[in-house]
Image (cartoon, rainbow, N blue to C red):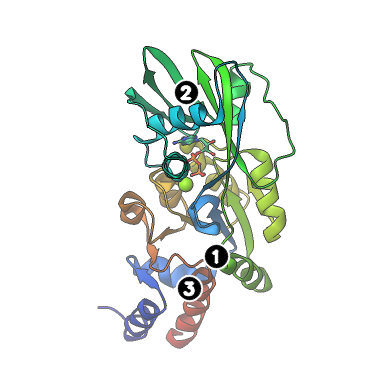
Amino acid sequence: AIPLVVAVSTSKSAQNGLLIRNRTAFENARRITTVVFDKTGTLTKGNFEVSEVSTFADGYDEDRVVSMAAGLEGHSEHPIGKGIVHEAERRKLKIPEVEDFEAIKGKGVRGSLEGKNVMLLSPGALSEMDIEVPGGTDKGAETRVFLLVDKVLTGSIALADTIRPESYKAVQQLQSRGIKCWILTGDNEQTAAAVADELGVDGYFAQVLPDQKQEKIRELQEEGEYVAMTGDGVNDSPALAQAQIGIAVGSGTDVAAATADIILVNSNPLDVSALILFGRATHRKMV
Ligand code: ADP
Ligand code: MG
């Protein structure tokens, strides 16, 4: 039978934007020592807007770079993809037809366009191909992706995401209760560092490929941490499962929600600290 106190608390938490799928996890919320946040879509809004387009090859102007990129991204579900398609629409560009689309996990996307191999890649993936990243390291909290046509660098697109205003307070509230906050992201080092610095978290893991996210959670656990992981993407599911408590953000994918113990209905990071308070209060009523 469900202990009455828990039943009351869980319905109370539903009113506060927490949907509890696993009661045991909820009861264990008071044990949490570290909360790991996925960056994009959890601490940030996940609404990328194009802030700058650069061109690096003859015959490629900004519009051509954006339209080719949008041809690829029309097939992608990633928030970066949505931002690029939106920019092409804003510029009223004709978006070309792309065939053989493929998502390269945690690195970018590729496809064929007019017989050419077109790729849109992260700075990390570019370095792996031994291509120097132009413009280097001074891009702050922006994310940049690079357009390669038959492996020739033709342009880059910078996109800016915004930190959710609630994220600042969520980190503060958790830290004031002695809980460490970490960021885990597939995004590049500079962007992760800028967001980590802005929010004042205890640490971050950047440029983590989807299948390594789980490993990072395990590392923290091996250091003795009791970990809650908050994420929104398909990519985050194994990490959500690995954490002692997996928390999915409501606006994220169904896959993440299916693995999670708890769902943040309003996608509000402040509900994570509310969860811990509820967990502690509920425990006090039970013992
Ligand atoms: P996270 O979910 O932690 O933000 P992802 O694993 O989804 O990270 O993506 C990591 C990086 O891979 C992105 O920051 C970007 O550079 C690149 N990337 C992923 N998907 C796309 C896409 N559709 N278009 C362009 N770049 C992408
Ligand atoms: Mg994500």
Q: Real-space Cα distance between discs 3 and 1? A: 10 Å
Local SS, label 3: helix
Local SS, label 2: strand
* Labelled disc at residue 119: 2
Label 3 or label 1, whichever comes before in sequence order = 1
Q: Looking at this view, name the residue that lies furthest to the left.
A: 1
Report crowding for label 2: few under 14, some 14 to 19, many 20 or more residues within 10 A (C-alpha): many
Amino acid type at mark 2: Met
Residue closer to the observer: 140 or 208 = 140
Which x, y percent locates residue 145? 56, 33
Question: Which residue is under mark 3?
Answer: 275
Label 2 or label 3, whichever comes before in sequence order = 2
Residue in the image at 37% along x and 57% along y:
260
Q: Is mark 3 within 8 Å of ligand 2?
A: no
Residue in the image at 48% along x and 73% along y:
275
Viewed as shown, does residue 39 lie left or right of 172? left
Quick check: marks 2 and 3 in contact, CB under 8 Å? Answer: no
State which quadrant residue 33 falls in: bottom right
Q: Is residue 227 visible?
A: no
Question: Which residue is under mark 1?
Answer: 32
Q: Real-space Cα distance between discs 2 and 3? A: 42 Å
Which x, y percent locates residue 273? 54, 72
